[in-house]
C-alpha cells in the first residue's frame, strides 16, 4: 500500500510499504477512505516531537471501511464504516472506566519510555512518535487499529466522510477545550489560535452557551473563518492583546482562555523571539508565548483550557499571575470516546457541520507538499483532507 | 577454613545465580580476549562457592550470620539485607482472579518473557525452563513454600538447579475497592552488598525493570486481554532503528 512516511525533520515522503495485518485479537484493519493532516502533525514535520524514527507512518485523523477483524473483536464487522479516534484505549483499565480515555494504562507498547519522561504512561496514539507507542498512522491506504472494539465509531451512510471525519480528533478536541471552560451564561471566551482546533473550539463554545468568543491569530483567512463562526477577532500583529481584551471585556478580562496553539507558538512579542532563539539553541523545548498571554489575560478566578500540545519543559510561565488570580488549568489529550457519539448526534441534528474548515482536498500522493503548504499558511490553507484511494468512495 | 553455614537460603540462591551468570559472562569475555574476563570469572566462581556451600568468608570475618530462620519464607524475604527488589502494580480485577491466573504456573511465560515453559509436577513442585545468554537455556525445580489462596504465593528453587532463586507475590485489595495491588519481592544478595546493582548492570539485566515489565504485561493481559504491540506493523523504507 501507499503511506506517508516520516524520514527526518522537513522530510516526509509517500512510499510503498507492506499492508498492515491483524497483530492482536481485538484489532481491526481499516481501508482508509479519507484522512487529514492535523496541526499537531506539523510539530512532527518541524522536528519538535522526540522519539520519531525514519520509517514511521504518520496520520491520526482517519476513517474508512473495516476490511478485517480480530477474533476477540465482537463489536465490528467487515464492511462497517467507522471513524477512528486518534487515541488508542483498552476500555477496561481504571482510567478508561472513568472516561479518561487518553490516559489509558494499557495501550502504549513503549510505556517504559513514557514513564521515564512523564512519570506515568499515557495512551498510545496513531502516528505520533515512539513515546506514545510508535503505532503506524492513518495517512495510508490501510491502517491497523488496536482495541478496535472500543475506539472506532460506526457512522451512518447518510453523512459524507467529510462531515464525520473530524470526529477523529479536532472536533472532540475543540469541544473538550470549550467544555473545560465550564461556560456559564454571559461568559466571554478568548481563544488563541484560529487553526482547525481553534475553529472547532469557537463553534463548540457557542454550542455550550458562550455569550461572546474572541479569536486571536494573524492569518487573515483564519480570522475570516472565525468571524463566520460568530467570533470577534483580534490580529496579534495589530497591537497588545492584553489591553485589547481588557478593553473588550469592560476591564474584567475573559472568563476563560483557550490555548489552541501549543508548543510552536509564534508571535510578535519580545518573549516569542526569545523563545524561538532558546528553542533553536535547545535551551527550551517548547515555545509557550500563547499560553503566557492566556494566563496574563484571563480574569480572576477564570479557567485556562489547553488543547494545544506541549511535550517538554516550558520557560518563564507566569505562575505568580496564575496563583494570585486563582486560575484553574485544564489540559491534556482529548478523551475521545467520551465525546465522539454525542458529537455525532449533534452533526446528525445539523447543529454543526465540521467540514467547514476544509480548504483543500487532495490525493494522498500530494501529502508531502500539503504538509508544507499547511505549515507555511500558503494558498489560504486551513485544513487538508487526503484521499488515499481516489475520490470514488463517499 | 571455617565451613559453617552463615549465609541464609535466599542469599545462597542469589549468590549462585549471580555467580553463575558472572562466571559465564567472564568466560565469554575471556574468549573475546578481554582482560576483565578472568577477574569476572573468578568473582563469579567465588559467588557460586558461597551459594553452594552457604559459607561466606566476608560474612564470617564480619561475624554476620544471616542463616537464622532460613526456612521461614516471610522472614527470609523480609528485612533489608542486600538489594531488595520490589515492584508493585495495581490491576483493575479481583485478587481471586489474579491469584488463580498466576497460580497456573504453565501460564507464566505468557507475561514473563524470559521463561520458556513451566510444568507443574504436583501441588507444590514445578519444573522451569528459562532463556539464558548466548541462546542457551537454564532449568530448575521449584517448590511452593508458602501459599495463601487469593493472597500470597512464596517459592524457592530446589537443590541441583542451574539457577537458584526465591520470591513471593502478594495480592492485596487496593483501598476504596479500586482493584488489586500485586506486589512481587525478590532478594538479591551478592557478597559486596550494593555491588549487586552494578553486577546487574554489567549483565545488561536490571532485575527491578524486568519485574516491572513482567507485571505490566500481567496487568495488560488481565485487564485488556492482550499486550499492546507494534511488532509486525508496516514501516517505511530506510528504517534502521526498531523497538519491536
Image: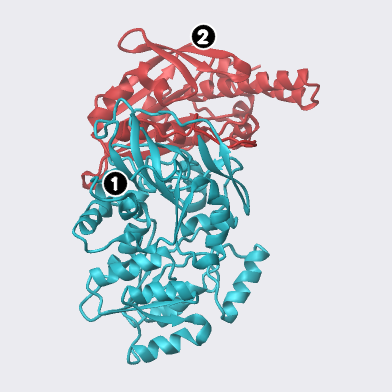
Chain colours: A cyan, B red
Helix, strand or loop status at disc 2: loop
| Residue B126 occupies quadrant | top left
Residue B47 in the image: state x and y as whole percent.
62, 22
Q: Is residue A334 left or right of residue A114?
A: left
The residue at the far left in this view is A349
How packed mark 2 is, by other alpha carbons closer than 10 Å (few <14, some 14-19, many 20 or more), is few
- Chain bearing mark 1: A
Query: Measuring 59% from the left and 36% from the top, which residue is drawn there?
Result: B197
Instruction: Output the chain of dot 2.
Output: B
Please provide percent x and percent y for residue B142: 42, 14
* Mark 2–mark 1 distance (CA, rounded to whole Å): 47 Å
Res. A197 image quadrant: bottom left
Classify A189 as above or below B216: below
Question: Answer yes or no: do the residues labelled 2 and 1 have beta carbons within 8 Å?
Answer: no
- The residue under the point 21% across, 44% down is B177
Residue of label 1: A96
Front-lying residue, A341 or A32:
A32
Residue A351 horizontal/vertical position (percent) = 22, 64
- The residue lying toward the viewer, choosing from B81 and A290, is A290
* Mark closer to the observer (2, 1): 1
Residue B20 vs residue B80, the one in the foreground: B20
Q: Relative to residue A189, is residue A167 depicted above or below? A: above
Mark 2, residue position: B160
Mark 1 Cα shell of 10 Å, populated few (<14), some (14-19), many (≥20) = many
Label 1: which secondary element: helix
> Residue placed farthest to the front in the image?
A392
* Tally of numbered tags: 2
Q: Is residue B75 left or right of residue B82?
A: left
Q: Is residue B49 visible?
A: no
Residue A179 appears anywhere in the view: yes
Q: Position of residue B73 (x, y in %)?
A: 38, 25
Amino acid at each position: 500500500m501507499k503511506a506517508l512516511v516520516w524520514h527526518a525533520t522537513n522530510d516526509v515522503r509517500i512510499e510503498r510499504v507492506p499492508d498492515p495485518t491483524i497483530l492482536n485479537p481485538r484489532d481491526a484493519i481499516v481501508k482508509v477512505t479519507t484522512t487529514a493532516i492535523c496541526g499537531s502533525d506539523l510539530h512532527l514535520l518541524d522536528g519538535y516531537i522526540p522519539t520519531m524514527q525514519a520509517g514511521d507512518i504518520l496520520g491520526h485523523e482517519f476513517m474508512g471501511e473495516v476490511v478485517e477483524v480480530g477474533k476477540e473483536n465482537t463489536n465490528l464487522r467487515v464492511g462497517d464504516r467507522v471513524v477512528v479516534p486518534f487515541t488508542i484505549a483498552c476500555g477496561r483499565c481504571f482510567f478508561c472506566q472513568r472516561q479518561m480515555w487518553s490516559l489509558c494504562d494499557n495501550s502504549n507498547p513503549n510505556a517504559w519510555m513514557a514513564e521515564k519522561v512523564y512519570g506515568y504512561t499515557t495512551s498510545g496514539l496513531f502516528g505520533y512518535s515512539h513515546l506514545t507507542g510508535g503505532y503506524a498512522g492513518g495517512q495510508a491506504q490501510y491502517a491497523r487499529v488496536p482495541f478496535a472494539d472500543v475506539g472506532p465509531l460506526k457512522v451512518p451512510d447518510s453523512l459524507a466522510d467529510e462531515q464525520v471525519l473530524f470526529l477523529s480528533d479536532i472536533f472532540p478536541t475543540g469541544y473538550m477545550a470549550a467544555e473545560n471552560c465550564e461556560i456559564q451564561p454571559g461568559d466571554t471566551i478568548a481563544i488563541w489560535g484560529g487553526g482547525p482546533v481553534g475553529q472547532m473550539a469557537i463553534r463548540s463554545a457557542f454550542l455550550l452557551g458562550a455569550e461572546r468568543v474572541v479569536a486571536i491569530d494573524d492569518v487573515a483567512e483564519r480570522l475570516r473563518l472565525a468571524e463566520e463562526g460568530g467570533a470577534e477577532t483580534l490580529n496579534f500583529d495589530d497591537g497588545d492583546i492584553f489591553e485589547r481584551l481588557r478593553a473588550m471585556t469592560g476591564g474584567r478580562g475573559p472568563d476563560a482562555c483557550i490555548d489552541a496553539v501549543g508548543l510552536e507558538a509564534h508571535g510578535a512579542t519580545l518573549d516569542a523571539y526569545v523563545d524561538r532563539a532558546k528553542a533553536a539553541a535547545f535551551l527550551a523545548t517548547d515555545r509557550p508565548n500563547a499560553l503566557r498571554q492566556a494566563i496574563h489575560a484571563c480574569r480572576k478566578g477564570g479557567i485556562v483550557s489547553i488543547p494545544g500540545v506541549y511535550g517538554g519543559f516550558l520557560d518563564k510561565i507566569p505562575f505568580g499571575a496564575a496563583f494570585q488570580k486563582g486560575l484553574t488549568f485544564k489540559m491534556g489529550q482529548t478523551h475521545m470516546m467520551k465525546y465522539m457519539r454525542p458529537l455525532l448526534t449533534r452533526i446528525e441534528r445539523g447543529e454543526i457541520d465540521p467540514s467547514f474548515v476544509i480548504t483543500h482536498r487532495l490525493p494522498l500522493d500530494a501529502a508531502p507538499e500539503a504538509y508544507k503548504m499547511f505549515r507555511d499558511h500558503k494558498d489560504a490553507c486551513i485544513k487538508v483532507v487526503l484521499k488515499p484511494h481516489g475520490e470514488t468512495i463517499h | 577454613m571455617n565451613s559453617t553455614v552463615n549465609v541464609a537460603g535466599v542469599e545462597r540462591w542469589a549468590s549462585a545465580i549471580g555467580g553463575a551468570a558472572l562466571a559465564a559472562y567472564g568466560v565469554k569475555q575471556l574468549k573475546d580476549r578481554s582482560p576483565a574476563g578472568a577477574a569476572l570469572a573468578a568473582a563469579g566462581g567465588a559467588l557460586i562457592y558461597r551459594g553452594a556451600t552457604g559459607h561466606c568468608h566476608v560474612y564470617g570475618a564480619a561475624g554476620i550470620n544471616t542463616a537464622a530462620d532460613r526456612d521461614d519464607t516471610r522472614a527470609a524475604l523480609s528485612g533489608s539485607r542486600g538489594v531488595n527488589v520490589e515492584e508493585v502494580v495495581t490491576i483493575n480485577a479481583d485478587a481471586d482472579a489474579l491469584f488463580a491466573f498466576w497460580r497456573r504456573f504453565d501460564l507464566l511465560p505468557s507475561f514473563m518473557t524470559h521463561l520458556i515453559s513451566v510444568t507443574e509436577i504436583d501441588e507444590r513442585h514445578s519444573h522451569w525452563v528459562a532463556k539464558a545468554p548466548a541462546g542457551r537455556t537454564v532449568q530448575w525445580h521449584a517448590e511452593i513454600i508458602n501459599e495463601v489462596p487469593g493472597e500470597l504465593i512464596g517459592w524457592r528453587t530446589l537443590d541441583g538447579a542451574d539457577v537458584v532463586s526465591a520470591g513471593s507475590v502478594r495480592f492485596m485489595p487496593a483501598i476504596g475497592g479500586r482493584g488489586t495491588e500485586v506486589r512481587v519481592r525478590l532478594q538479591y544478595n551478592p557478597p559486596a552488598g550494593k555491588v549487586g546493582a552494578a553486577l546487574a548492570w554489567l549483565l545488561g539485566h536490571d532485575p527491578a525493570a524486568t519485574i516491572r515489565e513482567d507485571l505490566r504485561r500481567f496487568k495488560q493481559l488481565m485487564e485488556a486481554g492482550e499486550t499492546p504491540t507494534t511488532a509486525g506493523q508496516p514501516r517505511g523504507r530506510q528504517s534502521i532503528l526498531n523497538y519491536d
